Image (tube, rainbow, N blue to C red):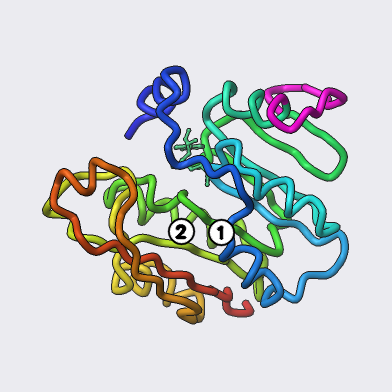
Amino acid sequence: MDAEFWKQAWFEGRTGFHRSEYHPQLLEFFPLFEAKNEQSILVPLCGKTKDLTWLSHQNLYVQGIELSEKAVREYFSDNSIENYNVEDNTYTHQNLTLEVGDFFHHEKPEGYDYIYDRAAIVALPPSMRVDYSAHCLSLLKPGGKILLITFEYDQSKLDGPPFCVPEKEVNQLYAKEGTIELLNKLSDKPNNPKFKEAGVTTFIQKVYLITKKEA
Ligand SMILES: C[S@@+](CC[C@H](N)C(=O)[O-])C[C@H]1O[C@@H](n2cnc3c(N)ncnc32)[C@H](O)[C@@H]1O
């Protein structure tokens, strides 16, 4: 799952992960952040999700990171936003900033208050998830929170993305530096035909709140 894979996916319009509505689990569980005005939230591997818009309406500074410039440009065109600034691969509109680049190279010394991970960790193969989760934690302030949405299904039936990220792995990746609360578990029939064809009958979505320990 290298940069070319994703850039090609955007180029060919293979973006079945994109939702035309705000994510219901974000709307339901965002209040648990108890966010205050002008705090900051990071949306890694953001694509062109509409959730960026919803978050930017919560009086937060919203920072998305996305490899594909096409995705970032489409975010603005899909949402009829014309008055944005572009400088050094960074697109800014009011309190929303979208950086075109590799999340693993993104730095913010003062850290973020929150991270919203929907279809981000599940987009990465197991070999990349250790570095991904460590980087998320390094970008989070002590006491900062992550809203994490994962999928679980029988990975032996087909390969990702999206990948199965089991609860045990979430614990291995985040428990050392954070406390983990399972907020929701939804069993669903997979709607993507490739899952049906592979014989995946159960698809579970899990939602976690991870709070980084105070230093
Ligand atoms: C499955 S999509 C999810 C997009 C978005 N989170 C959503 O919910 O619609 C994963 C996205 O991550 C981007 N991506 C993959 N690896 C990345 C990386 N290392 N840095 C930044 N973006 C990356 C891809 O281009 C793709 O848009």
* Residue, disc 1: 138
Count of marks, rendered view: 2
Q: Residues within 10 Å of mark 1 (few under 14, many from 20)?
A: some
| Residue at 63% in and 29% down | 72
Q: Secondary structure at mark 2?
A: helix
Eyeballing the image, is 113 above or below 167? above
| Residue at 73% in and 46% down | 53
Compared across the picture, whether 198 is left or right of 98 comes to left
Q: Amino acid at mark 1?
A: Ser
| Residue at 26% in and 42% down | 193
Tag 2 and tag 1, C-beta contact below 8 Å: yes
Range of magenta residues: 77-90
The residues tagged by marks 2 and 1 sit, at their Cα atoms, a distance apart of: 6 Å
Eyeballing the image, is 212 above or below 84? below
Q: Is residue 88 magenta?
A: yes
Residue 77 % position (x, y): 71, 24
* Residue, disc 2: 134
Q: Residues within 10 Å of mark 2 (few under 14, many from 20)?
A: some
